[in-house]
Image (cartoon, grey):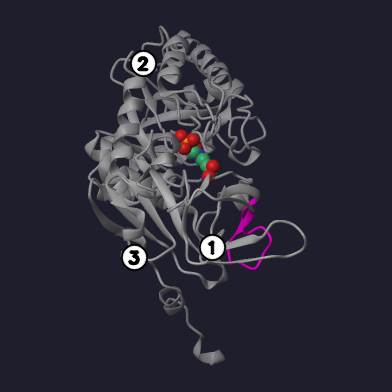
């Protein structure tokens, strides 16, 4: 359920008609709904109600906007961060350092130090080498870093190849068959408090079974570690729950996910940790765009050229992802069209042969389910700027990220004297 609904023929975000935002802020613009974020945060938490005190850390990569993080912080969420930049954002949103989990396959020396200095709650180690480096740094600074070891369970998540992370050939984690030996070696480091196992096999999972298979492997590993006298008090089960991108898509609910987790982790006797991203933010945002004009090329349906492009919303170009596309003020007339942006490559196409609301020049439309992995994956390709982001709360809205004009990006560049 989201709060982007038609009222008297106009699409609203909560109690704000979208045309009002377009008029005030321009297009393209990302629009997020606070009520939807809150609802998703609560539904996810309720799904885990059978568990004892789960730790929930929003995967900041999905939507790092400070206002979005603040909404989730107020819901008691921590943060899963994968860079110094994301860590700084989580801290700026007043997330408690102990509620921050530092994931990421290539944490730099400087980032490890930043995490130690901030006193973040847990480092999810991606390799034995990273563990030794962190141990050395922690000892040097008189600290002990709480850590989980991320394992690669070699399970096919059955999602898009580019967002699948738990197969042996993926770069993430340590091979599960070597995990016990690595955990033992790292547990012997005075600078580390090895306290758990982390796993995340992929994103946009539409099927719980691969997760359950992975969790079973983690359960066996925990038993094995304890059998060797090692302590395991935490298990981080990552994120990955899929969301419906197409009206009518059915995805496992947080309640079904929670029931599976409760079943799969029975008897583990650990504090379970979660890193949901998309399921919280995905359907809490839309990308609003304006039709520039339509054109025909060849004999097929017309191309509707909108003012948003692949640099603003990369998912269709990058993963062939589907985003529902709707007019903000639908007339009831329908058309079949290709929906494309202005960028000079064929990949800048959001949809081909899409049956959609009839649209003409100047009309507003939205790409739905753009609240996760939307604005954050933007680039300035074709010397386009970065689009504004707006947060709606009831009948009020605020710009929560300024539009960054192409000129501002250009202003950060210079021609060296010796070339001028
Ligand atoms: N934890 C870890 C370690 C992750 O790598 C990810 C996502 C998450 C949690 C959050 O997963 P979620 O609950 O959002 O599925 N750009 C891609 C998605 C990349 C996901 C990367 N990792 C897309 O637009 O589909």
Q: Which of 286 and 198 is in front in this view?
A: 286
Query: Which residue corresponds to mark 2?
Result: 270
Which residue is the site of mark 1? Answer: 360
The percent position of residue 110, horizontal first and vertical second, equals 40, 52
| Residue 188 x, y percent position in the rendering | 42, 25
Q: Is residue 347 magenta?
A: yes
| Secondary structure type for disc 2 | loop
From the image, tell me which residue sits under label 3. 23
Within-10-Å neighbours for mark 3: few <14, some 14–19, many 20+: few
Name the N-terminal-most of marks 1 and 2. 2
Residue 119 appearing in the image: no
**Which SS class for mark 1?**
loop
Whether tag 3 and tag 2 are in contact, CB under 8 A, the answer is no
Nearer to the camera, 354 or 239: 354
Q: In front: mark 1 or mark 2?
A: 1
Q: Quadrant of residue 294?
A: bottom right
User: Is residue 373 positioned above or below 201 on the image?
Assistant: below
Q: How far apart are marks 3 and 1 (CA)?
A: 18 Å
Judge whether residue 40 can be spotted in this image. Answer: yes
Span colored in magenta: 337-352
Query: Where does the image place residue 67, in percent across and percent down from the top left?
Result: 28, 50
Q: Do the residues labelled 3 and 1 touch (CB within 8 Å)?
A: no
**Residue 286 rendering spot, x and y as whole percentages:** 43, 49
């Amino acid at each position: 359920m989201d709060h982007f609904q038609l009222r008297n023929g106009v699409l609203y975000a909560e109690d704000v008609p979208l045309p009002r935002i377009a008029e005030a802020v321009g297009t393209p613009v990302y629009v997020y709904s606070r009520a939807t974020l809150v609802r998703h945060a609560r539904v996810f938490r309720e799904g885990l109600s059978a568990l004892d005190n789960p730790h929930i850390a929003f995967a900041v990569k999905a939507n790092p906007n400070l206002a979005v993080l603040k909404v989730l912080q107020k819901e008691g969420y921590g943060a899963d961060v994968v860079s110094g930049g994301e860590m700084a954002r989580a801290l700026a949103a007043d997330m408690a350092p102990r509620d921050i989990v530092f994931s990421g396959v290539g944490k730099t020396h400087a980032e490890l130090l930043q995490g130690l200095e901030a006193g973040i709650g847990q480092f999810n180690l991606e390799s034995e080498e990273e563990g030794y480096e962190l141990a050395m740094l922690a000892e040097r600074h008189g600290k002990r870093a709480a850590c989980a070891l991320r394992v690669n369970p070699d399970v096919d998540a059955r999602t898009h190849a580019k967002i699948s992370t738990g197969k042996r050939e993926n770069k993430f984690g340590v091979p599960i068959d070597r995990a016990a030996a690595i955990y033992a070696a790292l547990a012997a480091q005075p600078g580390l408090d090895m306290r758990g196992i982390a796993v995340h096999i992929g994103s946009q999972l539409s099927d719980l079974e691969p997760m359950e298979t992975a969790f079973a492997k983690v359960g066996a590993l925990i038993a094995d570690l304890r059998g060797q006298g090692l302590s395991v008090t935490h298990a981080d089960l990552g994120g990955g729950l899929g969301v419906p991108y197409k009206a009518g898509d059915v995805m496992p609910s947080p309640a079904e996910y929670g029931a599976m987790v409760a079943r799969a982790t029975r008897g583990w006797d650990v504090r379970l940790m979660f890193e949901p991203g998309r399921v919280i933010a995905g359907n809490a945002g839309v990308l609003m765009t304006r039709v520039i004009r339509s054109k025909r090329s060849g004999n097929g349906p017309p191309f509707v050229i909108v003012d948003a492009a692949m640099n603003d919303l990369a998912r269709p170009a990058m993963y062939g992802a589907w985003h529902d596309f709707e007019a903000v003020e639908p007339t009831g007339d329908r058309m079949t069209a290709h929906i494309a942006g202005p960028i000079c490559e064929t990949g800048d196409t959001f949809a081909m042969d899409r049956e959609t609301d009839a649209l003409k020049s100047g009309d507003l439309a939205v790409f739905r389910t753009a609240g996760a992995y939307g604005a954050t994956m933007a680039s300035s390709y074709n010397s386009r700027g970065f689009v504004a982001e707006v947060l709606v709360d009831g009948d009020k809205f605020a710009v929560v990220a300024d539009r960054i004009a192409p000129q501002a990006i250009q202003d950060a560049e210079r021609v060296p004297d010796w070339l001028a």
